[in-house]
Image (tube, rainbow, N blue to C red):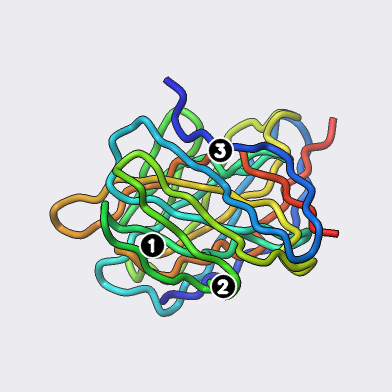
Amino acid sequence: LAKTTQPISMDSYEGQEVNITCSHNNIATNDYITWYQQFPSQGPRFIIQGYKTKVTNEVASLFIPADRKSSTLSLPRVSLSDTAVYYCLVGGGYQKVTFGIGTKLQVIP
Amino acid sequence: NAGVTQTPKFQVLKTGQSMTLQCAQDMNHNSMYWYRQDPGMGLRLIYYSASEGTTDKGEVPNGYNVSRLNKREFSLRLESAAPSQTSVYFCASSEALPTGRVLPQHFGDGTRLSIL
């Protein structure tokens, strides 16, 4: 099971682009990289998933280098409503997934 | 479209009491999961069910039992509640492709359980 390492917390001003990097040195060949967002008193919500290179959707981009040992979630022009905990997960099948403590992003006015 | 529905939303128990947390999903997903989340910690997997009729232990299964009642419903039972089981419990569901790849999970809003 691939272990992930991400910063415990980050601060950003409104309107800035935020990049959160996750390290996963022992990622397996068939593993995908998935990011979730969690607001207080709610369950996690899927943001984006990727396997390699770059994936973009309406809320975020995910950058994955060729060696896949890390990934970067990019949130463009954050607002106060993006204040949340962001989790990076690596896996592909029915593994004993652990979310870890995630990255607590605080957006400042 | 309700997604994943958990009941109850809040519950207070006394040590030694039993309790079943209910979870239902309306997305026709094969796989369902139970997690617990403690303050300052991420989510830890208690049990999961890859498909109807199967269940498997996760990271922290001790003190819990599960039942995959049908494709829609997956319940979590505490037979003899302990204060250490005070937590927020989340249920989730997901689909899996024929290749074995598990697609992202959809979560309920949680059950906040306090055991005195």
Indicate the secondary structure of the residue bearing disc 3.
strand
Q: Residue B61: image x %, image y %?
A: 53, 72
Q: In this view, does A11 lie to the left or right of A22?
A: right
Disc 1 crowd, CA 10 A, few/some/many (<14, 14-19, 20+) = few
Vertical relation: A78 (above or below) B48? above
Vertical relation: A36 (above or below) A98? above
Q: What residue did someone put label 1 on? A: A65
Chain of the residue on which disc 1 is drawn = A
Chain of the residue on which disc 3 is drawn = B
Residue A5, disc = none
The type of residue carrying mark 1 is Pro
The type of residue carrying mark 2 is Val
Indicate the secondary structure of the residue bearing disc 1.
loop
Q: What residue did someone put label 2 on? A: B60
Label 1 or label 3, whichever lies nearer to me, is 3
The type of residue carrying mark 3 is Gln
Q: What residue did someone put label 3 on? A: B6
**Residue at the spot x=51%, y=47% of the render?**
B91
Label 1, label 2: how far apart the Cα atoms are: 33 Å
Disc 2 crowd, CA 10 A, few/some/many (<14, 14-19, 20+) = some
**Residue at the spot x=36%, y=43% of the render?**
A55
Vertical relation: A1 (above or below) A49? below
Q: Residue B37: image x %, image y %?
A: 67, 57
Quadrant in the rendering for residue B100: bottom left
Disc 1 with disc 2 on a shared chain: no
Q: Residue furthest front?
A: B17
Can residue A62 be seen in the rendering of this structure? yes
Q: Nearer the viewer, residue B84 or A34?
A: B84
